[in-house]
Every structure is written in structure tokens, then in C-alpha cells.
Image: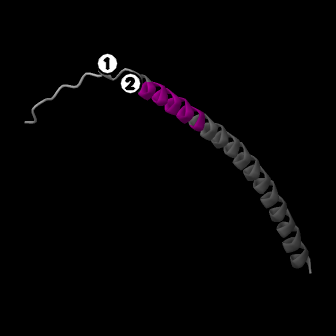
Amino acid sequence: MRFLIVIISLYGSFANAAVQDFNSLVKEASIQQKIIHKKLLQSIQNTKVLVASNEVQEGEFAENPEDIKVRLVRAN
């Protein structure tokens, strides 16, 4: 009977430790998710800026096609 009580008490302490570790893992995952979300939003913003910049440059070339100089080079 004592053996059964010891096993039950050990099982209870292991279960409690597992829940504490699980809670810390959930907190860590939440923090990592926030960091990844910020990086994703920053990447999207940078992409939007680059696309807008490219559109402005293409618009300038379309308005002044004589400003574009093309030179042919022989291939070796």
C-alpha cells in the first residue's frame, strides 16, 4: 500500500512539472510568433516600398525614352 502511495505522489509531482514546462514553452512560442510577425510585416513593407520605387523609375523612363542609352556589345 505504501508503494502505491509513493507512486501516486511521484506521478503527481511529474505531472505538475510537465505543466510548468508546457506553460514556459507556450510563452516562448508566443514570443517567437510575435517576433516572426514583426519581421513578416517589415518584409511586406519593404517590398511595397521597392515596388513603388520601381514603378516610379519605370514611369520616368516611359516619359523620357530618349534618356535611355543602349549599347551593343559583341559576345565572345
User: The N terminus appears in which quarter of the rendering?
Assistant: bottom right
Residue type at numbered disc 1: Asp
Q: Which residue is drawn at the image coordinates 79% and 53% (left, top)?
A: 23
Residue 76 against residue 6 in the figure, above or below: above
Asked if residue 9 lies in the magenta stretch, the reply is no
Expressed as whole percent of the image width and height from the top left, the position of residue 58 reads 42, 28
Residue type at numbered disc 2: Phe
Instruction: Give the label on residue 41, or none.
Output: none
Expressed as whole percent of the image width and height from the top left, the position of residue 45 reads 59, 33
Asked if residue 56 lies in the magenta stretch, the reply is yes
Expressed as whole percent of the image width and height from the top left, the position of residue 54 reads 46, 29
Q: Which secondary structure is most common in the magenta stretch?
A: helix
Sequence-earlier tag: 1 or 2: 2
Instruction: Give the label on residue 67, or none.
Output: 1
Question: Which residue is more in the foreground, 23 or 6?
Answer: 23
Element under disc 1: helix
Residue 19 against residue 64 in the figure, above or below: below
Question: Which residue is more in the foreground, 12 or 58?
Answer: 58
Q: CA distance from mark 1 to mark 2?
A: 7 Å
Residue bearing the label numbered 2: 61
Label 2 packing within 10 angstroms: few (<14), some (14-19), many (20+): few
Circles 1 and 2: CB atoms closer than 8 Å: yes
Q: Which residue is drawn at the image coordinates 66% and 42% (left, top)?
A: 37
Image-quadrant location for residue 19:
bottom right
Left or right: residue 72 versus residue 13 is: left
Left or right: residue 19 versus residue 74 is: right
Q: Which portion, as a residue range, is magenta? A: 44-59
